[in-house]
Image (spheres, rainbow, N blue to C red):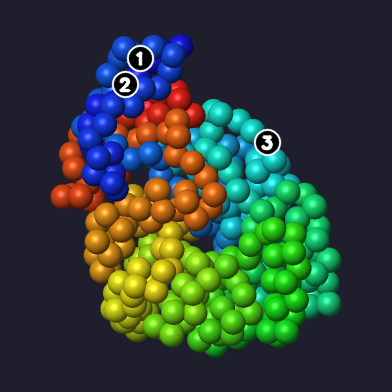
Amino acid sequence: MTSWVFEGTVLPSGDTTRLTFGADADGERLPGRYGVPGLVDAHCHLTMAPGTNGPVLRGADFAADRLGELADAGVSAVRDVGGNRDVTLHLARTADDSRPLVLAAGRFLAPEGRYFPDAYEPVAPEDLLAAVESEIADGATWLKLVGDFPEVGPDGPIRGSKVSPSYDVTVVEAMVELAHARNVRVAAHVNTGHVTELIRAGVDSVEHGTALTERDLETLGSRGGAWTPTLCASIGPHPGETPEQASRRQARSEYLASVLPLAERYGVRVLTGSDVVGTVAAEIDLLVKHGLSVEQAIAAGSTGAQEYLGLSGAGNLVTYDADPRAHPGVLARPAAVVLNHRRIA
């Protein structure tokens, strides 16, 4: 197997160093003068695809193709936060150096009428703890709680714009307590002020979080929590959107730009997540445009996420010809990718 050598600047630290991948310390030189020790997609859905009535679940082949695309983009680790549990939990249980590492939450946890009908099996409040036990028994290291959602009809379309909590907060508290007792963490989808109650209930990471306040960040940060804002999904334009929808999207963007810089102050770990519409590179670029320093944004998509998720960047590297600190957009154009000590791109 060919050995590879990188000589250049490693980000986000900015250290100049020499890294060797393979047995030969004098291997071939990797292209690129700047490197990141693997990108992390912390909010990904490996088995979800667009459908007629909202997202639909796909199988193992779809997930394999998606992992291949992520690997080529320099992603070395993925946190899958909801999808086809049979596929994602199998990936999480199975070691395979040829693809990115997968952490998986398994199924979406939401009651009847509180998520896209083709993407989940409803879980009634009285069945939530049993569902949690099942996911953990099958290898979930995270759980995905749909904390709030608009009412959804049985045929798919969302009914109205009102977003309501999915479960009573006492049920959520019991779920979080059970998860933590099993050394499993909880990620919560939430886009309303209900985020305050969910943080008080003990959820570990907030997903989307378009209504987070400074006080929420202070509480979340006090116990080392995380926030994955998924900006590509939250503020990205949608085909056929109305002027009113575009205006609401712009308002969300402006609000997020006002609160994102506060995360660092309160110790909240910001993470990057592609959801089903974006990329880690695009997410890092948007984080910079919404108030994070370029070093903070790169950490959110690499070393910071690795630390929060208990991972290591050792053996992984994605390189670039130009300095991403000057031009974050170059993150979308890797010069080379090393995954688990082997060059794959």
Helix, strand or loop at mark 2 = strand
Q: Label 1, label 3: how many angstroms apart (C-alpha)?
A: 30 Å
Disc 1 residue crowd, few under 14, some 14–19, many 20+, Cα 10 Å = few
Horizontal arrangement in the rendering, residue 235 relative to residue 211 (left or right): left
The circle on residue 5 is 2
Q: Tag 2: residue type?
A: Val
Q: Residue at x 54, y 75 (%)?
A: 190
Q: Quadrant of the C terminus?
A: top left
Coordinates of residue 82 in the picture (x, y in percent): 62, 58
Eyeballing the image, is 329 above or below 185?
A: above
Q: Label 2, label 1: how many angstroms apart (C-alpha)?
A: 7 Å
Q: Quadrant of residue 120?
A: bottom right
Helix, strand or loop at mark 3 = loop
- Indicate which label's residue lies in the foreground, 2 or 1: 1
The residue beneath circle 1 is 25
The residue beneath circle 3 is 94
Residue 312 visible from this viewpoint: yes
Coordinates of residue 52 in the picture (x, y in percent): 57, 62
> Residue lying farthest left?
326
Q: Residue at x 22, y 31 (%)?
A: 8
Q: Tag 3: residue type?
A: Thr
Q: Residue at x 53, y 81 (%)?
A: 195
Disc 3 residue crowd, few under 14, some 14–19, many 20+, Cα 10 Å = few
Residue 191 visible from this viewpoint: no
Q: Are marks 1 and 3 in contact (CB under 8 Å)?
A: no
Horizontal arrangement in the rendering, residue 129 relative to residue 226 (left or right): right
